[in-house]
Amino acid sequence: MSAVPGITIDGPARRVCLDVRNPDFYRNPLPAYAALHAQCPAFFWEEPQQWFFAGYEQVNALLRDRRFGRQILHVATREELGLPGPKPHLKDFDALEAHSLLELEPPAHTRLRTLVNRAFVSRQIEQLRPDIEALSHAIIDSFETDGAVEMLKTYAETIPVTIIARMLGIPVEAAPRLLDWSHRMVKMYVFNPSFATELDANQASAEFAAYLKDIIAEKRAKPADDLLTHMIGSEKDGERLSEAELISTTVLLLNAGHEATVHQIGNAVGAILQSGLLPATLFADEEATARTVEECLRFAAPLHIFQRYALTDIVLEDGIALRKGDRIGLMLGAANVDPRKFMAPDTFMPDRNEGANMSFGAGLHFCIGAPLARLELNLSLPILFRRLPGLRLKHEPPVKDSFHFHGLERLDLVW
């Protein structure tokens, strides 16, 4: 049994009871992760009733294992699997998910990713460097003399949503609406969303899709030099993206293009200020900055769970038997603090050289926006700390009551 509050572990049976709404857990899951690594890094989690994996090697392998997928209904019917039918009140949300790059498997995934990928390769993303730098400075200019700021809404949220909107060719003035729709939709990815959450996410999906339909019509009439126009005109083997695919892909890029990065910027600033390490050393040059960013991604990851379906009956090497249609949870945040992979994993140590973190996933669904997220972090963090050398936490930042997306509620800074 575990001595960590809020978690009960039966190591020999590999059974775990853990309430994700327990503040002790979601505010700081690292002690629970340490207990799991010590007793059973692969375990059956009683509350969601499925198997989860916390070990680095197993998470890395299962992310790449083609016997698992993000969807299941392309290889089996709901009736075969005993799954309930679609919920009518989630029709608009499900319509966006049906063509989402994140939810598809080959060949649909391959076709869609090929059409979008060109805009996200490193050499294309590198061209955004002057824009990101200028935007970071302009935002700091607006509050530098105030001596205090709530950083999440002012800085962390503004940079990613502005950049991804510009890339896509969506008016930056729409950013508040985009953020509102995104925040309402991502609440669907936590354990057991409420009926009210489902209704609200569906409404946000309907509004988002209607807005994008109008934008796409404008781009067809007046093509521009932007990603949305590129996606409209992209062709592979004589095929183009349908309107439904265009809308789903744009929603995914907007949501994923800022939601995780907002949390990561906030988590990184909090981790750096709590570490006691000198920002001047952490961001001494590009190499030191890159190491610091990778350690922030490892130590303070924004996304902690990635789910996959077993596409066939499977028995894993450790004897865990899965039936076709079973879901598994891959614990990215826990894999990042596996003591078998990282020395003193609960310590923020930017001079590590122990291999890649799992924060962007791996395999087929490795985050398409990773080069963009890394560039935004490598530019926005050093600029913030150089411009505000006396930066410190006003008080302990409150953590969001959301386990899947580990992030701060707000981040009040003073200097």
Image (cartoon, grey):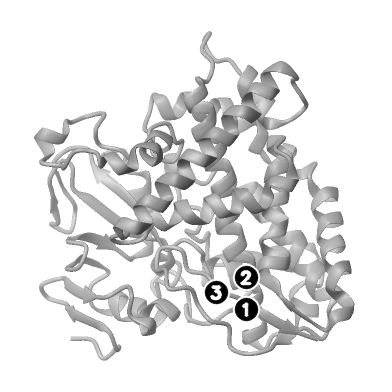
SS of the residue under disc 3: loop
Q: Position of residue 1 (x, y in %)?
A: 18, 86
Q: Residue at x 30, y 56 (%)?
A: 195
Estimate how packed mark 1 is, as few (under 14), some (14 to 19) or many (20 or more) residues with alpha carbons within 10 Å: many
Residue 6 vertical position relative to residue 206 in the rendered view, above or below:
below
Q: Residue at x 40, y 37 (%)?
A: 92
Horizontal side of 121 relative to 88 (left or right) equals right
Snapshot quadrant of residue 393: bottom right
Q: Position of residue 157 (x, y in %)?
A: 66, 61
Q: Residue at x 62, y 70 (%)?
A: 266
Q: Are marks 2 and 1 in contact (CB under 8 Å)?
A: yes
Snapshot quadrant of residue 81: top left
Find disc 2 in the rendering and name its residue: 266
Q: Position of residue 252 (x, y in %)?
A: 52, 42
- At label 3, which amino acid type do we have? Glu
Earlier along the polypeptide chain: callout 3 or callout 2? Answer: 2
Of the two numbered discs 3 and 2 in the rendering, the one whose residue sits closer to the viewer: 3
- At label 2, which amino acid type do we have? Gly
Mark 2–mark 1 Cα distance, whole angstroms, equals 6 Å
Find disc 1 in the rendering and name its residue: 270
